[in-house]
Image (cartoon, rainbow, N blue to C red):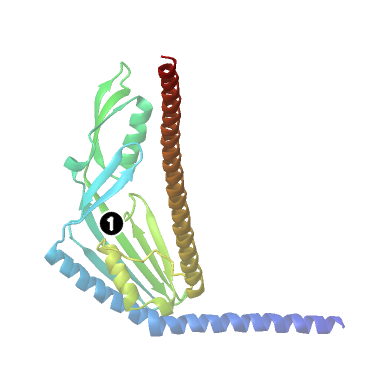
Amino acid sequence: MGLLDDLEQEAQRRKAGADDQDRAKQEREAAYRTQLEPGMAALHEYLSKLTQNLSFIKPKKTLRHALPGYGDIVLQVEHEYDLKIQSQPASKEIRLSFPCPILTEECPNVEVLGATKIKTVAGAFQRFHIGGVTITKKDANGEALAANVRARGRITLSAVFNADAESGVVRLQFANFDQIGGQQTKTIAPDQFNETLYDEIGRYVAREPNNLFREALPDDYRKQLRTKVQQEEMKRRWETQMAQRQRDELAEMERQQGLAGKLTKVVDQVKAGSLFDKLRGLVKKDK
């Protein structure tokens, strides 16, 4: 094979690769136009109705988020929602946020001693815009030696939903929902972006039981897990039965040994009594 043949094959390979890229790009753009763009509009409408109902009903919801070095910070959902949507020719973005006041009276009232510990706790509070650190004692140089800490203020929970023709997917991002300062993210394919997903998002936002961040297991794997659980259950049941049988057998052996011991004692007493009677008879004969 000559040089020209090699060059022609390389050119064909690159052309095929470029064609594949163009085809994939066209598929992503088509998915955005036919599924993601109308889906984002439907999600915005769903979230609008959801937040309106929550604002009217105002269900009492409290959240507990652990903060290292301090303890649980208790939040209460205020149901004041800010929902916005931004549209571009080839992308859409939905933003949702709502504040959660800190229930100070339900948060720990902690005395922190030592400059290092105080700086650690105060730094965490400052990073998350939480108040409630009061210095109660300083040394001669003004260094904090003791502080009273009780969280106050508010934490904002936020969610961002992005869809664009370039990626051909929807990206979900939630902040402060499960942990102060924490983020949860998930990427959704066009065929999964439907009313079922809207409902899972709604339940997650409303802090109701949901499966938004639980990965679906294949049916075969789920069947294997179910079979394994059943096998483990049968094994535990068998072990329990065997253990109970052993306990019953041991109790029966102890009972029989107890009866045997009592019988031996009675026999010994009878034998002793017979010998005494014989001796008493001999004495009488001598007389």
* Image quadrant assignment for residue 51: bottom left
Question: Could you tell me which residue is drawn at 12 percent across and 66 percent down?
Answer: 56
Q: Residue pushed farthest right? A: 1
- In-front residue for pair 277/14: 277
Quadrant for the C terminus, please.
top left
Q: In the picture provided, is 266 more to the left or to the right than 43?
A: right
- In-front residue for pair 145/279: 279
* Image quadrant assignment for residue 129: top left
Mark 1 closeness class: few <14, some 14–19, many ≥20 residues within 10 Å: many
SS for callout 1: strand
Q: In the picture provided, is 153 more to the left or to the right than 142?
A: left
Question: Could you tell me which residue is drawn at 44 percent across and 77 percent down?
Answer: 165
Where residue 120 appears, as percent x and y from the top left, is 36, 34
User: What residue is disc 1 on?
Assistant: 157
- In-front residue for pair 246/138: 246
Where residue 68 appears, as percent x and y from the top left, is 36, 40
Q: Where 188 falls versus 148 (above or below)?
A: below
- In-front residue for pair 190/270: 270
- Number of callouts in the render? 1
